[in-house]
Amino acid sequence: MVPPAGLKALRGFPVAGVASGRCLLMGILNVTPDSFSDGRQYLAPDDAVVHGLDLAAAGADLVDVGGESTRPGAVRVTEQEELRRVVPVIGALVASGVRVSIDTMRSRVAEAAVNAGATVVNDVSGGMADPAMAATVAGLDVAYVAMHWRAHSRTMQQFAAYSDVVEEVRAELVQRMDVLTAAGVDPGRIVLDPGLGFAKEAPHNWALLRGLDRILDIGQPVLIGASRKGFLGRLAHEAYGALPAPADRDGMTSAITALAASGGATCVRVHDVRSSRDAVTVAAAWQPRP
Ligand code: PMM
């Protein structure tokens, strides 16, 4: 079907039961002591579950549970610690009817999370950090978010060098698709993500948002994760002269959400679900009626 003029084709998130005419909302739940925006806040399992339920009540289609911070400079946690943080929280949220994704680079954490009820594996390394991830995901009945990634967080900013960031990120995502599908992952289950802030400086992030069409024309659903990130803080600083704290970047985040949604993104990953819910609702209402 040819979409009406001005309406970007919105490809569905490949998870049973997650279907909508609007861009979907993935709410962020970091069960970590050191994430850049919500680190420490939800480290206790009960606090994490309450926040996950709040995200769902605010309109999150999925709650993305992560037990390892990937902020620039972050040091890795052990697999055991990651499992200890996420598995009970996922179990409790799923038991309450919340749809959960697991934010992990480790195949064994992905598998344990899926056993606890997660239906999406969100891997910021797109399968590069753990050579067993692709085969593990191929054997699971889940959707897989493959993000553009070049190196672990401790050193990734050393790899933020591009001559044409959009074309290079696009080519590296296509390469990930090839590796994943060769390992048996059904392409119908793969969501791609340009990985804003991961081995990217602020101008790279803006170029990728401007170049969203080039990522979309790979032909897969696309997820955008811009929420509260440093490049938004930097923009506010340049525009208004004061650097907002991460939690004060939700206005800018919801502007990104509206633009990404109207540009054809299938999902946005956000901390403040309510403001982005308003943004995707407005973006959907703005589109021409079929
Ligand atoms: N960003 C972070 C963590 N996980 N997953 C995807 N798919 N895309 C992202 O951009 C992304 C992610 C880092 O942000 P956080 O510390 O607020 O979770």
Image (cartoon, helix red, strand yellow):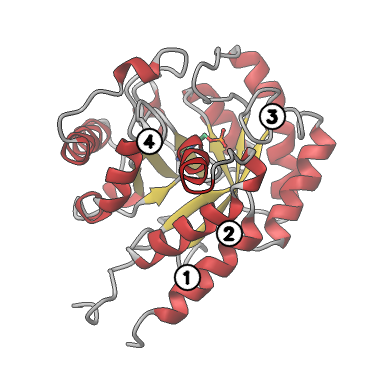
Q: Nearer the viewer, residue 113 or 211?
A: 211
- Image location (x, y in percent) of residue 202: 38, 36
Label 3 lies in ligand 1 vicinity (Cβ under 8 Å): yes
| Residue 48 drawn at (x, y percent) | 76, 38
Marks counted in the figure total 4
- SS category of the residue bearing label 4: helix
SS at badge 2: loop
Q: Residue furthest bottom?
A: 289
Would the CB of label 2 be found within 8 Å of ligand 1? no
C-alpha span from label 4 to label 1: 31 Å
Q: Can you tell which mark lies on residue 61?
A: 2
Front residue of this view, candidates 163 and 233: 233
- Residue under label 4, please give it: 202
Examine the rendering and report whether any part of residue 16 can be seen. no
What's the amino acid at mark 1?
Ser
Foreground mark, 3 or 2, reads 3
Badge 4: how crowded within 10 Å, few (<14), some, or many (20+)?
some
Q: Between disc 3 and disc 1, whose residue precedes? A: 1
- Disc 2 residue type (three-letter): Asp
Mark 3 element type = loop
Q: Answer with mark 4 or mark 3, whichever residue precedes in sequence.
A: 3
Question: Dots 1 and 2: beta carbons under 8 Å?
Answer: yes
Within-10-Å neighbours for mark 2: few <14, some 14–19, many 20+:
many
Disc 4 or 1, which lies upstream in sequence?
1
User: Tag 2 or tag 1, which sits nearer the N-term?
Assistant: 1
Q: CA distance from mark 4 to mark 3?
A: 22 Å
Q: Are marks 3 and 1 in contact (CB under 8 Å)?
A: no
Q: Quadrant of the N terminus?
A: bottom left
Q: Quadrant of residue 256?
A: bottom left
Residue 61: % across, % down: 58, 59
Closer to us: 123 or 119: 123
In this rendering, the label closer to the viewer, 4 or 3: 4
